[in-house]
Image: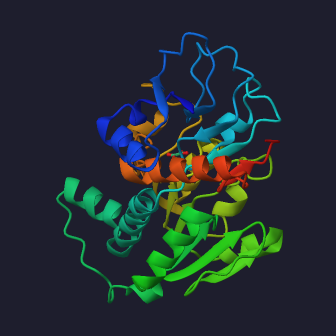
Amino acid sequence: MRILLADDLAFTDAFEAALRAREPDVELYRWPSLPDDGHFDVLLAWCLPDGLRRLPDSLAFVFCFGAGADQLLSDPRIPSHVPIARLVDENQAAQIADYAAHVGFARLLDQVTVKEDQARALWSEADGPRRTRDQLRVAVLGLGHIGARVASELARLGFSVQGWSRSHKSVPGVETFAGEDGLVTAVEAADVLINLLPLTAETEDILSQKLFARLSSGAYVANLGRGGHLDEAALLGALESGRVGAAWLDAFRQEPLAPDHRFWSHPRITITPHLAGIPTASGAANSLADCIDAFRRGFPLPNLVRPGRI
Ligand code: OXD
């Protein structure tokens, strides 16, 4: 089986070694190197390289080297009969849970206000006892593999967690909601909002002025989904009014974020360059190997985002 690796993160000896430990007989090519006849069976990519204009008829499936596959699902170069499966890596999910916990703890201390006061040498004493974790409402949007892990980890840490997804899911320790009405209830008076939804026509711009208006005053917002989820003007307005106290942004409509983008210099925005969860060599290789095993046995691929037709 020939696999075209078209993502720099897979160009590592550790990834190749972990994959070969499970699939010793695969032939690996690192884009832009291709087999002489141009044929390969599996394409691994997060986003198709510009130079890869046509995919061969031999292509059996695409393996999305990331948690979100919208950028592949909308790519017309991938014929609709070709299945797309995505990577599922517990280590990546754990990193994202750490990021979300960081935002939760930052809200407990109101870290952004503390830093602003410090910059002004302002000794501003607390006017009451600090809140405890169970008094902090955290809303997690998206309860897929990563969202469910994040929500249950935050609940395990003692935060009061509400989770929302389009269809009903249950997550131990988490109060879950679904559907349009459920969204309003899930985010009502939330102190922290963590977005982990997939980007679809329904979820585009979901982080809107209307949604921010439901949060508790000074809420911290983390967009760990896609730039397309965020109405940027609405966020700036909510920061201005104080409805949102601070934002952590990891994904942007255009990546890298343009150097003159307003977000860079905003004192209440923290920018992380799409690093909330980086697939690990072993997690990614095992996830791909699970797909190869299933394909060889004629079973449906695990973690399909588009079934296609094998
Ligand atoms: C993604 C990822 O899909 O980082 O954005 O995995």
> Which residue occupies 53% across, 45% down?
66
Tell me: 259 left or right of 56: left
Q: Position of residue 263 (x, y in %)?
A: 46, 39
Give the quadrant of the N terminus.
top right
Give the vertical position of 14 relative to 208 (above or below): above
Q: How is the image coloured?
A: rainbow
> Which residue occupies 40% across, 42% down?
20
Tell me: 36 left or right of 78: left
> Which residue occupies 28% across, 80% down?
126
Give the vertical position of 48 relative to 180 (above or below): above
Which one is in front, 213 or 136?
136
Q: Quadrant of residue 80?
A: top right
Q: Report whether residue 217 is seen.
A: no
Give the quadrant of the C terminus.
top right
Which one is in front, 188 or 2?
2
> Which residue occupies 45% across, 47% down?
285
Which one is in front, 310 or 73?
310
Tell me: 149 left or right of 14: right
Q: Position of residue 147 (x, y in %)?
A: 57, 66
Q: Report whether residue 273 is seen.
A: yes
Give the vertical position of 286 relative to 5 (above or below): below
Q: Position of residue 35 (x, y in %)?
A: 53, 15
